[in-house]
Amino acid sequence: MAPSKHIPGNYGRKLKWRMRHLTAAALCCVAMSAQAQTPVFEIEIREHLFYPSELKIPAGQKVKLIIHNRDATPEEFESYELNREKVIIGNTQGIVFIGPLKAGEYPFFGEFNPKTAQGKVIVE
Amino acid sequence: MIRSCGILCAAGGRVSFLLVGMLIGIPIHADNLLHHNGVGRVYDPYVQPLERELELRTYYQTDDDPIESDILRQRVGFGAAINERVFAELYLIGMKLPGSAMRLESYELESKIQLTEQGEYAADWGLLVELERQRSESIAELATTLLVTRQWGNWVGTVNLGVEYEYGSNIRNEFDTFMSAQWRLRYRESLEPGIEIYADEFTHGVGPVLTGLVRGSGNQKWYWEAGIILPANDTTPAYTYRVLLEYEF
């Protein structure tokens, strides 16, 4: 019996397996940390209103805004001040990246229902 | 824009075009220049789902050379978003030469693809694919253009870099490159001044442009652009006036 002969082979396979998983884990960490650098905020559209209608975000930082349209009809998140325009089909969600912005208030509205769907991003 | 055959003898001294030619090394061929004008529009890389639009573009050029003067081009288009990332538009393109009526010259199918979300990266990216076919001659053109936009505060810079393949039995088959760029101030929604640059194998032009958006009821919008492009080489018309009107609904 020569178990010692098998050890290097097993060790090599285990090392490769560990390295592969460590690499994958490292890549996941990098990806997660990259994602974590962009704070995520969420807004809902219900009955042609934005919830919350006032959203506070940090100054000088890009943020990811996920807009859930709970209505059956489409809505357009629109803001000249933010330089953003995004149509969100009914019962779906849209992603809008905003910033980095200076402190201040940036109004937005729903273009399909501008009288009711209004809000602002407060940067502080 | 498809080239037709002929020779232009544009007159007048013009300033040399420094930037664009050096950047992309535009090839110069002197075999198909008649009535060519590479001034078009500068495309942003964005697509909105459910968007539909009617578009009218008018170009009017004057020049010291009477052959290249008093030429009117018009382009009428209807476009619609196919999905969240792709917008397609069909154009009819007409041209009016001095002393003759407006004539339908060609058809064009255009597709814009938004590649990245606005603001996600340092610049926003898109792709434009165009197929144009002459109506009365065997000349066609397939072009692919990279669309890049970046915002700096209240300023927005957009660059379109393209390569096109012209083919058909009435033209020498060849690849060409072209570029256009716009630098625009976000002054207010209804009025944004800027400057535009156009460059292809014959056209080297630069000039001021005004753009703006006027809102109608609901999701209806009127978008407009107007500009004057001046020559930076001898094969660009002395003045190219361009007006664009889009009705989005």
Image (cartoon, rainbow, N blue to C red):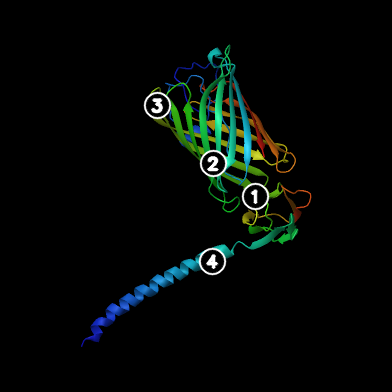
Which amino acid type is marked by label 3? Answer: Gly
Looking at the image, is mark 4 or mark 2 nearer the viewer? 2
Residue A67 position within the rendered picture, expressed as x and y whole percent measured from the top left = 66, 57
Q: Are marks 4 and 1 on the same chain?
A: yes
Alpha carbon distance from label 1 to label 2: 16 Å
Q: Residue at 49% across / 25% down in the picture?
A: B202
Circle 2 packing at 10 Å, graded few (<14), some (14-19), many (20+), is many
Alpha carbon distance from label 2 to label 3: 25 Å
Q: Chain under label 3?
A: B
Query: Pointer 1 and pointer 3: residues touching (CB < 8 Å)?
Result: no
Left or right, B203 with reference to B228: left
* Numbered circle sitting on residue A86: 1
Residue B230 position within the rendered picture, expressed as x and y whole percent measured from the top left = 59, 25
Residue B144 position within the rendered picture, expressed as x and y whole percent measured from the top left = 47, 38
Q: Would you name the residue on which mark 3 appears?
A: B168
Q: Chain under label 1?
A: A
Alpha carbon distance from label 4 to label 1: 26 Å
Which amino acid type is marked by label 4? Answer: Met
Q: Farthest bottom residue?
A: A1
Which amino acid type is marked by label 1? Answer: Lys
